[in-house]
C-alpha cells in the first residue's frame, strides 16, 4: 500500500479529542474534509455540539497543571522527535486536507519542529525579574520580584486553514510551555493535522486535560468558544471579519488577534531586479499564496520596472503547479474552488479597469495558476482587499515618499519586504511603514518561530505571536516584595 492510501486509511472517521478522550459527533453528525485537488472525501470529523465544547472547558478548568519546567521541556522535545520521525505521513495529511503541495507541507512540518524546540527552551527559562528597592531617596531595604503564572482559566484557540499544522502549534506549544490548558478549534476546512498533533503530544506525555481539540461548525459552537465563563483568553488567527466579530463577542477576556494582511514588497531603483523578482515569486506563490504575509502588492520603482517585470514573468512561467502529491510540484491547489473563482474574478475585473494580465489567471476547480498583473492601481479590488492566493500585482512608483504613502494607505499593517541597499532609505522605511515587521532583502513572511510577529491596524491589535511573545500573553505577571 502506498503512503497516500495508508494515510487515508488512518484518517477515515476521526473523533474529537476532549481531554484525551475520543468523542464522535453523536446527533450532531459529521463534517466532510475534502482533498481540494480531486474533491474526494479524505476524512470526516464530528460536528461538535455546544454541550461538547462546554464539557471540554469544564474538564480543562477543573484540572490544575503541575508539570515542572523540565517535564514540559521533555514533552515538547519528545513531540518534536515524534514529528520528525513521522515527517512524510504528516506532510501527506496536510496536503490531503489543504491541497498544499508536498514541498510546502514538508516545509511546514519542519517549521513545527522549530516551534517545539523554541517552546521547550522557553519552558526552561525562569523569566522573573528582580528590583532593588533602594533606587530613590525614599527607598527601602526591600526587593520586588516578579514571576509569571499560567492563567487561572482556560485558553480558547481558533485557527485558520492556511497552515493547518503551523498555526495550531504556534498556539499549542506556548500553552504547554507555560503550563496552561487549551481548548482548540481548528478550521473546519483543515481539522486533521490538529488531531494528529494532539495524539503526538499525548504520546509524548502531555496530561490530556491540558489540550482538547474540538471540531465543528463555527456558527454553532463559535459563541461558546468566545463567551464561556471558564475562558480567560481567546487566541485567534484568521480573517479580519471574524477577528472583529470576536473582538466584540469575547468581552472582558484577553484577546490575541492575528488577522489578515496585504503585504507589500518594495523594489527601489538601486535594487538588483533579478534578485527582487525571485523574492517576489517566492513571496507570492509559496503555500499557494495563502500566507497572511504573502506578497500581495508589489511596488516597483519606475527605473527598474521593465527588467523586474520580465524577470518575474519568466520566474512565474517556470513555477510548476499541479498535482499536490507530486513531489516535484512547486504549488498545489488553493483551499477550494470558491476561493479560486474569487481570484479569477478579481483579476478579470482589474483587467477590465486597465490592468494588464502578463501571465496566468487560469483556473480548473481549486487549481489556480500563478498570475502576474501589471499596471495595477490601489483602488482595484485585487489589491484593495486581501487576495489570499497566488497573484502578483505590480504597481509602480517614482519616489520614497510616494511608496510610503501607497503602502500606508492600506487598511492592513502586517509585514513588508524591502529591496534596496541604501541604509538611509531602509531606516526611513523601518520607521515610517505602518506595519508589524520590515524585512530587508527578504519576503514579508520571513521570521524565526521564536521572534515577535504580528500586525497593527486591521491586521491585529498589536499583541504579537512567535513563541516568546505568545508565552508572555499566555501568562499573568505576579509581583511580590519582601524585606530582604
Ligand atoms: P477565517 O477568519 O474564515 O476562519 C478562521 C477561523 O475562525 C476558523 O477556524 C473558523 O472556523 C473560525 N470562525 C469562523 N466564524 C467564527 C465565529 N463566528 N466564531 C468563532 N470562530 C469562528 O479565516 P480562514 O479563511 O480560515 O484563514 C485565512 C485568513 O487568516 C486570512 O485572512 C489570513 O490572512 C489570515 N491569517 C492571519 C495570520 C496572522 O498571523 N496574522 C496567519 C494566517 C492566516
Image (cartoon, grey):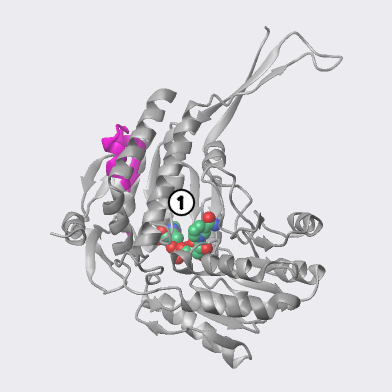
Q: Is residue 134 left or right of residue 330?
A: right
Residue 431 among those drawn in magenta = no
Q: Which residue is mark 1?
A: 226
Q: Mark 1, residues whose alpha carbon is within 10 Å: few (<14), some, or many (≥20)? A: many
Q: Is residue 63 above or below residue 154?
A: above
Q: Is residue 238 left or right of residue 277?
A: left
Against 390, residue 484 (above or below) is above
Q: Which residues, given as a range, are shown in magenta?
A: 197-216
Q: Where does the image place residue 402, in percent across and percent down from the top left?
A: 79, 72
Q: Quadrant of the N terminus?
A: bottom left
Does the stretch in magenta take in 213? Answer: yes
- Which residue is nearer to you in this view: 105 or 38? 105
Residue 242 seen in the current view: no
**Residue at the image position 75 percent from the left and 70 percent from the top:** 269
Q: Relative to 252, say whether 141 is above or below.
A: above
Q: Residue 153: x percent and y percent?
A: 45, 36
Identify the residue shown where x is 30% and y is 40%: 82
> Can you give x and y, in whole percent of width and height, for residue 58 in the image?
34, 39
**Considering depth in this image, is 49 or 183 the residue closer to the camera?**
183
Indicate left or right for 371 with 219 as reference.
right
For the question of whether residue 392 can be seen, the reply is: yes
Q: How many marks?
A: 1
Q: Quadrant of residue 9?
A: bottom left
Q: Position of residue 303 (x, y in %)?
A: 75, 77
Q: Farthest residue to the left: give it.
A: 1
Query: Farthest residue toward the right?
Result: 137
Which quarter of the figure is the C terminus placed in? Answer: top right
The part of the image, by quadrant, that contains residue 7 is: bottom left
- Mark 1 CB lies closer than 8 A to ligand 1: yes
Q: Is residue 92 above or below residue 352?
A: above
Amino acid at each position: 500500500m502506498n503512503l497516500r492510501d495508508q494515510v487515508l486509511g488512518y484518517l477515515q472517521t476521526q473523533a474529537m479529542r476532549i481531554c484525551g478522550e475520543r468523542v464522535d459527533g453523536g446527533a450532531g453528525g459529521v463534517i466532510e474534509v475534502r482533498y481540494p485537488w480531486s474533491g474526494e472525501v479524505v476524512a470526516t470529523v464530528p460536528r461538535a455540539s455546544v454541550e461538547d465544547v462546554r464539557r471540554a472547558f469544564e474538564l480543562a478548568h477543573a484540572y490544575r497543571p503541575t508539570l515542572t519546567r523540565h517535564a514540559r521541556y521533555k514533552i515538547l522535545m519528545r513531540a518534536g522527535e515524534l514529528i520528525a520521525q513521522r515527517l512524510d505521513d504528516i506532510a501527506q495529511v496536510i496536503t490531503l486536507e489543504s491541497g498544499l503541495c508536498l514541498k510546502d507541507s514538508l516545509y511546514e512540518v519542519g517549521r513545527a519542529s522549530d516551534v517545539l524546540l523554541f517552546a521547550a527552551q522557553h519552558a526552561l527559562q525562569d523569566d522573573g525579574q528582580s528590583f532593588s528597592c533602594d533606587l530613590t531617596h525614599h527607598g527601602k531595604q526591600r526587593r520586588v520580584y516578579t514571576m509569571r503564572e499560567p492563567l487561572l482559566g482556560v485558553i480558547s484557540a481558533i485557527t485558520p486553514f492556511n497552515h493547518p499544522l503551523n498555526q495550531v502549534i504556534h498556539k499549542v506549544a506556548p500553552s504547554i510551555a507555560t503550563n496552561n490548558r487549551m481548548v482548540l478549534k481548528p478550521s473546519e476546512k483543515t481539522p486533521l493535522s490538529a488531531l494528529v498533533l494532539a495524539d503526538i503530544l499525548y504520546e509524548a506525555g502531555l496530561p490530556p486535560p491540558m489540550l482538547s481539540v474540538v471540531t465543528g461548525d463555527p456558527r454553532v459552537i463559535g459563541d461558546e468558544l468566545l463567551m464561556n465563563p471558564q475562558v480567560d483568553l481567546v487566541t485567534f488567527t484568521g480573517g479580519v471579519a471574524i477577528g472583529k466579530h470576536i473582538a466584540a463577542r469575547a468581552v472582558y477576556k484577553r484577546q490575541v488577534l492575528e488577522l489578515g494582511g496585504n503585504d507589500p514588497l518594495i523594489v527601489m531603483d538601486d535594487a538588483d531586479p533579478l534578485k527582487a523578482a525571485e523574492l517576489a515569486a517566492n513571496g507570492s506563490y509559496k503555500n499557494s499564496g495563502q500566507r497572511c504575509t504573502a506578497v500581495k502588492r508589489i511596488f516597483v520603482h519606475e527605473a527598474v520596472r521593465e527588467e523586474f517585470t520580465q524577470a518575474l514573468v519568466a520566474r512565474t512561467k517556470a513555477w510548476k503547479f499541479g498535482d499536490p502529491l507530486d513531489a516535484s510540484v512547486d504549488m498545489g491547489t488553493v483551499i477550494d474552488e470558491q476561493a479560486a473563482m474569487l481570484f479569477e474574478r478579481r483579476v478579470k475585473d482589474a483587467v477590465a479597469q486597465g490592468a494588464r494580465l502578463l501571465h496566468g489567471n487560469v483556473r480548473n476547480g481549486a487549481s489556480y495558476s500563478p498570475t502576474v498583473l501589471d499596471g495595477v492601481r490601489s483602488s482595484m479590488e485585487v489589491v484593495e482587499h486581501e487576495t489570499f492566493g497566488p497573484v502578483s500585482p505590480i504597481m509602480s512608483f517614482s519616489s520614497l515618499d510616494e511608496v510610503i504613502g501607497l503602502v500606508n494607505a492600506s487598511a492592513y499593517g502586517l509585514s513588508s519586504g524591502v529591496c534596496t541597499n541604501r541604509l538611509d532609505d531602509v531606516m526611513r522605511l523601518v520607521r515610517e511603514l505602518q506595519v508589524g515587521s520590515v524585512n530587508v532583502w527578504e519576503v514579508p513572511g520571513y521570521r524565526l518561530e521564536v521572534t515577535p510577529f504580528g500586525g497593527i491596524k486591521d491586521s491585529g491589535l498589536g499583541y504579537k505571536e512567535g513563541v516568546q511573545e505568545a508565552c508572555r500573553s499566555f501568562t499573568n505577571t505576579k509581583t511580590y516584595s519582601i524585606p530582604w
